Image (cartoon, helix red, strand yellow):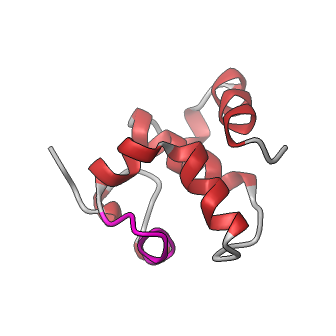
Amino acid sequence: MNRPIVELRNLGPRCAEWLAAIGIIDEDGLRCIGAAVAYRELVVREVVRPHRMLLYAMGGALLEVDVNRMTREQKVRLEEDCGLY
């Protein structure tokens, strides 16, 4: 099911605005590019300042898990995949 960004777990209207700035407007768009690449694009294009919690929130959204329930391994994998840390 292709949901708008605001309907994904961990993400809200502000995240939807940021992601729209790089051309991602729905779940399929985020899933296609991946949380790590989307985060890297947001930072590189200076849409947002670097903040790991945003990376985790997007990753958790795609995994359908609350960011507070993500394992350390899941978070480290996202960090490695984005290439900024």
For the point 40% across and 51% down, which residue is it?
30
Queried whether the magenta region covers residue 36, the answer comes back as: no
For the point 61% across and 55% down, which residue is it?
39
Q: Is residue 54 visible?
A: no
- Vertical relation: 63 (above or below) 83: above
- The quadrant of the rendering that contains the C terminus is top right
Q: Which residues are magenta?
A: 15-25
Would residue 76 appear left or right of 39 to someone viewing this image? right
Quarter location, residue 82: top right
> Residue 64: horizontal and vertical position, in percent?
38, 37
Most frequent secondary structure within the magenta stretch: helix
Disc tally is 0
Return the residue found at the far right. 85
> Residue 19: horizontal and vertical position, in percent?
46, 68
Return the residue found at the far left. 1
> Residue 51: horizontal and vertical position, in percent?
75, 60
Would residue 55 appear left or right of 18 to someone viewing this image? right
For the point 42% across and 68% down, which residue is it?
12
For the point 41% across and 75% down, which residue is it?
13
> Residue 25: horizontal and vertical position, in percent?
32, 66
Q: Is residue 64 visible?
A: yes
- The quadrant of the rendering that contains the N terminus is top left
- Vertical relation: 73 (above or below) 30: above
